Image (spheres, rainbow, N blue to C red):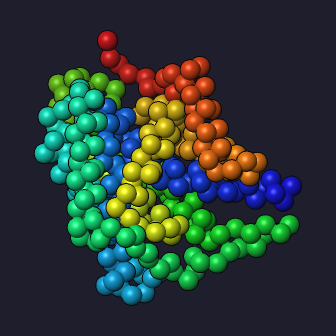
């Protein structure tokens, strides 16, 4: 039972990381049908923002707290700039957006190498997040994992409230359901797109801050994460936030179980096979989007 609970928490912590990575992608991919391969580089930007701030603010705890909003703004601004310069001209052409944003991701990786160098860098975690919490039954829980879990939960709650309660959220949902009808109803769809891209990219920046607590920072860290993020979004259902949440934690638990029973490589294969089998049975994903489109 102790091993089972320990592996369950490991899976939940992996799922929290996947959720943070995929949350912003679910928003932009779901609304604008843009395959943004540069999303991983926005995660990298958030991580490097934490690194830079730690050179200025030497206290690790304060630098982490400051990095969360700053990384959100930095990555969000990069997303808006990408939308204005390139994505705006490629709506309704998802394959073109894939190729263009892939090129942008390579440019951003090289820019990171030019600015910070090719070797990975490391940030210092706050002392509060470096230890473990001992639970009854001999179970230990890492503080940094608990922090990431709380951060992912807070991001989901904030995004859900914003989409369901605020006027901006109602405009976003209107554009998702029927872009043409929303436009003729007086909604500035281009402004909604820019705002959505800002929020989605900013969430990637927050994910980058969280990932600094788990490992080193490098120019290619986003490339290693983007495929998992797309898998979570696709299996959960395009544009479905609840599907993204459920699938992120389900894949995290499946991967943790596979790693315990076999090895990391075999666990990755198990997760991929499970995803392929699920999509063969339900290609639209776990949840489908209800629209008012006549097509």
Q: Quadrant of the C terminus?
A: top left
Residue with the most extreme bottom position: 58
Can residue 113 be seen? yes
Classify residue 44 by image quadrant: bottom left
Q: Nearer the viewer, residue 286 or 211?
A: 211
Vertical arrangement, residue 16 with respect to residue 170, above or below: below
Q: Position of residue 257 (x, y in %)?
A: 72, 47
Vertical arrangement, residue 164 with respect to residue 274, above or below: below
Residue with the most extreme top position: 295
Q: Quadrant of the N terminus?
A: bottom right
Q: Position of residue 128 (x, y in %)?
A: 58, 80
Residue at 38% x, 64% y: name it. Answer: 218
Classify residue 10 by image quadrant: bottom right
Residue at 32% x, 55% y: name it. Answer: 42
Q: Total of numbered circles in the picture?
A: 0
Residue at 56% x, 44% y: name it. Answer: 248
Q: Position of residue 217 (x, y in %)?
A: 41, 67
Residue at 57% x, 32% y: name it. Answer: 275
Vertical arrangement, residue 237 with respect to residue 129, above or below: above
Q: Is residue 3 left or right of residue 248?
A: right
Vertical arrangement, residue 58 with respect to residue 211, above or below: below
Q: Is residue 250 left or right of residue 112?
A: right
Q: Position of residue 124 (x, y in %)?
A: 47, 80
Can residue 185 be seen? no
């Amino acid at each position: 039972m102790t091993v089972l609970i320990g592996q369950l928490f490991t899976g939940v912590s992996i799922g929290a990381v996947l959720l943070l990575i995929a949350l912003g992608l679910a928003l932009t991919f779901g609304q604008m049908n843009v395959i943004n391969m540069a999303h991983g580089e926005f995660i990298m930007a958030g991580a490097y923002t934490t690194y830079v701030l730690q050179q200025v603010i030497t206290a690790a705890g304060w630098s982490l707290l400051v990095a969360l909003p700053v990384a959100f703004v930095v990555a969000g601004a990069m997303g808006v700039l990408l939308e204005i310069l390139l994505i705006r001209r490629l709506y309704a052409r998802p394959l073109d957006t894939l190729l263009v944003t892939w090129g942008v991701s390579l440019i951003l990786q090289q820019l990171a190498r030019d600015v910070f160098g090719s070797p990975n860098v490391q940030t210092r975690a706050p002392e509060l997040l470096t230890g473990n919490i001992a639970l009854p039954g001999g179970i230990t829980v890492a503080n940094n994992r608990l922090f990431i879990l709380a951060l992912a939960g807070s991001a989901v709650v904030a995004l859900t409230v914003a989409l369901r309660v605020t006027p901006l959220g109602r405009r976003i949902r209107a554009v998702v359901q029927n872009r043409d009808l929303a436009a003729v109803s007086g909604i500035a769809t281009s402004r909604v797109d820019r705002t959505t891209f800002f929020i989605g990219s900013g969430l990637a920046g927050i994910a980058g801050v969280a990932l600094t607590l788990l490992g080193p920072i490098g120019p290619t860290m986003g490339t290693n994460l983007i495929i998992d993020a797309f898998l979570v979004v696709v299996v959960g259902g395009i544009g479905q936030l609840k599907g993204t949440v459920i699938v992120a934690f389900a894949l995290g638990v499946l991967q943790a179980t596979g790693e315990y029973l076999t090895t990391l490589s075999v666990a990755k294969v198990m997760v991929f096979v499970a995803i392929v089998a699920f999509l063969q049975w339900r290609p639209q994903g776990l949840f489908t989007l209800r629209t008012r489109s006549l097509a």
